[in-house]
């Protein structure tokens, strides 16, 4: 069963001020151990070396109390830095890096996050900007710690770990992510669920004792081998499994038929959906737009469509690449060091939306000026106004980092509110959209 432990200690690590713990079986043992350590004047280095009884049914070889000492030492030695619980809201400019696997995102995905599984991170570092603040997530924090260390060893200096991972984030943001009826634990007053009209399971999967994300990954792998319409019974000891399995079923087109608490295990019955139901389930109302052109009329059309979709309540992502990046440049020259080639690109490319030209009938700038005057006379929003409206409406504007490198455009040269991302970030949103435009 998961345990959440909070430890307060001095900045030199020699004194422990207090501790709090939340969980089920075994929390009393750990808080007693910490209380004795505090009473005897132990520091965090003593926690690492405590010799505690070990047996697999009750604890790991390194007890959670030992692990608290290890984590505290990592903080004091600068190997890792934690964020606050509300860091995502407090740092809107930060890159949110999610290193979980694809199957985990089917159960819960972080808003506006860049998704790179931990196993792929070393080969995809170029998709991230070392100069930007990066907050790293996984399910509970272990893989995120490894990701933080990888980034720090590759020149990322402003990297922080979200404590407790996506599971803790969900528990602190429950208002915005309320449980769906299918994700709640359903059982009668006697603790037993009504079983009539529920088919007998064709397979039983025991995920008890598995740490997150073990249960959902095991369900994902096993379900692929089952025929359509077959029912699987899954038992797990992780309390978060009830939420995960409900969300996962909605995203994958499978059906959650029942979910109950049996003793200390959470048991779910899942019916595999057909490919047709999966396609229907994955249908989304999101819109994605690749803005490849730097022509005024085409960029205008892109933002008009984006604002219209946002006004209808649809999630919109605009991915600016190559010549389209010029619309996102600041009008003023920025003091950033550049190579000769980068400086030449910067000189030749339009600096911002006000410098864009028409794709046809530009006539040395006369056509562009006439177009802007007509738009003003007819009370049509300028491109600059459309960009601001799009940002206020929640349109996600992403600049392609690969194109930026090729064209010598630095993050400091882009207008405020623009996110940086690679093709993976765009494709993640495109897969959840039902309209994809290339302009």
Image (cartoon, grey):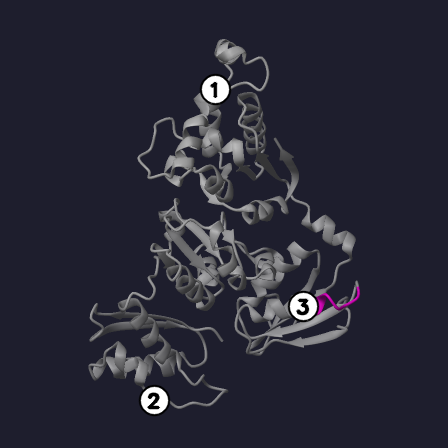
In-front residue for pair 65/435: 435
Any part of residue 275 in sight: yes
Is residue 87 inside the magenta stretch?
no
The secondary element bearing badge 3 is classed as helix
Residue at horizontal 20%, vertical 81%? 41
Residue at horizontal 41%, vertical 27%? 347
Residue topped by disc 2: 51
Q: Position of residue 325 (x, y in %)?
A: 49, 33
In-front residue for pair 185/93: 93
Query: Could you classify mark 2 by the number of other residues whose Cα lies within 10 Å: few (under 14), some (14-19), or many (20 or more)?
Result: few
Residue topped by disc 1: 382
Q: Position of residue 423 (x, y in %)?
A: 56, 46
Query: Could you classify mark 1 by the number of other residues whose Cα lies within 10 Å: few (under 14), some (14-19), or many (20 or more)?
Result: some
Region rendered in magenta: 222-227
* Depicted 220 relative to depicted 15: above or below: above
Q: Quadrant of the C terminus?
A: top right
How far, Cα to Cα, is label 2 from label 3? 38 Å
Residue topped by disc 3: 221
């Amino acid at each position: 069963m998961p345990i959440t432990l909070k430890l307060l200690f001095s900045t030199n690590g020699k004194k422990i001020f207090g501790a709090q713990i939340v969980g089920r079986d075994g929390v009393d043992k750990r808080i007693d151990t910490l209380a004795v350590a505090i009473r005897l004047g132990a520091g965090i280095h003593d926690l690492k070396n405590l010799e505690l009884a070990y047996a697999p049914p009750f604890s790991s070889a390194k007890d959670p109390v030992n692990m608290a000492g290890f984590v505290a030492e990592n903080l004091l030695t600068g190997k890792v830095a934690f964020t606050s619980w509300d860091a995502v809201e407090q740092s809107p400019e930060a890159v949110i890096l999610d290193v979980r696997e694809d199957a985990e995102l089917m159960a819960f995905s972080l808003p506006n996050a860049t998704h790179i599984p931990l196993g792929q991170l070393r080969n995809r570092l170029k998709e991230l900007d070392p100069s930007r603040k990066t907050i790293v997530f996984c399910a509970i924090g272990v893989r995120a710690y490894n990701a933080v260390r990888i980034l720090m060893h590759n020149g990322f200096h402003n990297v922080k770990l979200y404590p407790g991972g996506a599971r803790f984030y969900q528990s602190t943001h429950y208002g915005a992510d309320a449980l769906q009826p299918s994700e709640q634990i359903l059982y009668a007053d006697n603790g037993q669920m009504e079983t009539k009209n529920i088919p007998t399971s064709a397979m039983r999967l025991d995920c008890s004792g598995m740490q997150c994300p073990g249960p959902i990954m095991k369900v994902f792998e096993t379900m692929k081998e089952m025929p359509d319409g077959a029912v699987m019974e899954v038992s797990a000891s992780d309390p978060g499994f009830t939420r995960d399995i409900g969300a996962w079923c909605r995203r994958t087109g499978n059906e959650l038929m029942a979910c109950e608490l049996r003793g200390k295990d959470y048991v779910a019955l899942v019916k595999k959906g057909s490919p047709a139901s999966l396609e229907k389930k994955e249908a989304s109302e999101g819109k994605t737009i690749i803005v490849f052109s730097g022509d005024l009329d085409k960029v205008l059309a892109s933002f008009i469509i984006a604002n219209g979709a946002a006004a209808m309540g649809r999630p919109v992502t605009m991915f600016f690449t190559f010549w389209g990046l010029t619309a996102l440049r600041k009008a003023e020259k920025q003091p950033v060091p550049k190579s000769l080639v980068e400086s030449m690109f910067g000189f030749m490319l339009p600096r911002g939306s006000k410098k864009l030209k028409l794709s046809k009938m530009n006539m040395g700038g006369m056509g562009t000026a006439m177009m802007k005057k007509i738009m003003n006379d007819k009370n049509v929003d300028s491109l600059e106004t459309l960009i601001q409206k799009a940002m206020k409406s929640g349109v996600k504007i992403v600049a392609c980092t690969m194109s930026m490198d090729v064209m010598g455009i630095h993050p400091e040269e882009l207008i405020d509110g623009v996110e940086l991302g690679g093709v993976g970030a765009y494709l993640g949103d495109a897969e959840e959209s039902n309209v994809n435009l290339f302009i």
